[in-house]
Amino acid sequence: MPAATALTAAASLLAAAALVEAADTTGVSVSVSETDISIQIGRHAGDPAVRAAAVAAYAGLLHTTVTRTPARHSPGSRVETHAVLAGHPVHVWTFIDPPEPLDLLEH
């Protein structure tokens, strides 16, 4: 990996770590691809409402909104937020299976 790419990825990881700490969440999966940050709130983090609330907490920190979109290859949906943090595109998301009701975003 070229030094510039490694430094860019390291800066993205630092930004992601600061965001996870500010959101006070545990058990998330963070991946970085150069400047892009993806944070997944997995099923093990709680029921659908808890996971959606975690995405909403990130959205609040990032000053953006939460959306619910149909999943591409399954009958469920994704609750997600997109933003830019210190020049790094950020995507925070969780997957909600179809039988799982989610009143949090219906209001």
Image (spheres, rainbow, N blue to C red):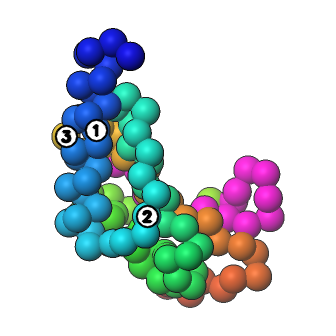
Q: Which residues are magenta?
A: 70-83
Residue at 28% x, 38% y is 12
Q: Quadrant of the N terminus?
A: top left
Which residue in the protein does label 1 denote?
12
Residue at 31% x, 31% y is 9
Q: Earlier in the sequence, mark 3 or mark 1?
A: 1
From the viewer's perspective, tell me whether residue 12 is left or right of residue 93.
Answer: left
Which residue in the protein does label 2 denote?
28
- Residue 66 lies, in percent from the top left, at 44, 64
Nearest the viewer among 32 and 66 is 32
Tell me which amino acid carries mark 2: Val
Given contact means CB atoms under 8 Å apart, are the residues at marks 3 and 2 in contact? Answer: no
Looking at the rendered structure, the secondary structure element under dot 3 is loop
Mark-to-mark CA distance, 2 and 1: 16 Å
- Residue 84 lies, in percent from the top left, at 29, 43
Residue 80 in the magenta stretch? The answer is: yes
Q: Vertically, is 68 above or below 1?
A: below
* Mark seen at residue 86: 3
Q: Vertically, is 52 above or below 14?
A: below
From the viewer's perspective, tell me whether residue 64 is left or right of residue 67.
Answer: left
Tell me which amino acid carries mark 3: Ala
Q: Quadrant of residue 64?
A: bottom left
- Residue 19 lies, in percent from the top left, at 25, 57
Q: Vertically, is 18 above or below 4?
A: below
Nearest the viewer among 99 and 1 is 1
Mark 2 neighbour class, 10 Å CA radius: few under 14, some 14 to 19, many 20 or more: some
Looking at the rendered structure, the secondary structure element under dot 1 is helix
